[in-house]
Amino acid sequence: MKYNPVGVGEIELENIILDLNGTLAVHGELVAGVKPRLLKLKELGYNLYLFTGDQRGNAAILSEEIGIEIQRATSSEEKEALTNKLDVSKTVAIGNARIDIGTFRSTKLRIATIQAEGIHAGILSHVDVIVPSINDALDLLIDPNIFNATMRQ
């Protein structure tokens, strides 16, 4: 998907790396509204990736529910290695925890979500945008007007 924020120029994104616990799911349950937004992003041509340490042990069940194959990563370094297999110049990462720094280091756009499971302060220097929920993060990518307003210079 291509965006064109004023003063920044064209930004093309193709891949979205998602964290599970504290991001797509809170207290082990998918956040309401996530599934239709993920389907919309797929319709828009995004490739979706779920990198998770599977803290709660339910990643397989939740990934099946949302139709995204999981890739297990138990450390920030493992998430970074998985991230670097993608075209990071066209990749956005969304997360909330210290382990997500691995996905934030080299991606084009980095979004942190602040939800009920919290946000690790260490990621703040690694992100471009902070939103109150995963749905807000996904809406930012779905609606070019939101994206362009947030990213404009």
Image (tube, helix red, strand yellow):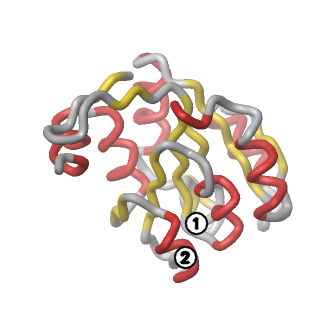
Quadrant of the image occupied by residue 74: bottom right
| Nearest to N terminus: mark 2 or mark 1 | 1
Question: Would you say the residues marked 2 and 1 are in contact, meaning their CB atoms lie under 8 Å apart?
Answer: yes
User: Helix, strand, or loop for circle 2?
Assistant: loop
Q: Nearer the viewer, residue 99 or 31?
A: 99
Count every numbered label the image shows and give the total. 2
Three-letter residue code for mark 2: Glu
- Give the residue number, with chain letter if any, for mark 2: 117
Query: Residue at image x 48%, y 75%?
Result: 116
Q: Position of residue 124 (x, y in %)?
A: 47, 74
Q: Position of residue 152 (x, y in %)?
A: 18, 47
Horizontal side of residue 11 vs 92, given as left or right = left
Q: Position of residue 73 (x, y in %)?
A: 83, 54
Query: Residue at image x 42%, y 33%?
Result: 36
Q: Nearer the viewer, residue 33 or 134?
A: 134
Report the quarter where the N terminus lies: top left
- Give the residue number, with chain letter if any, for mark 1: 22
Horizontal side of residue 74 vs 7, given as left or right = right
Q: Nearer the viewer, residue 125 or 97?
A: 125
Three-letter residue code for mark 1: Gly
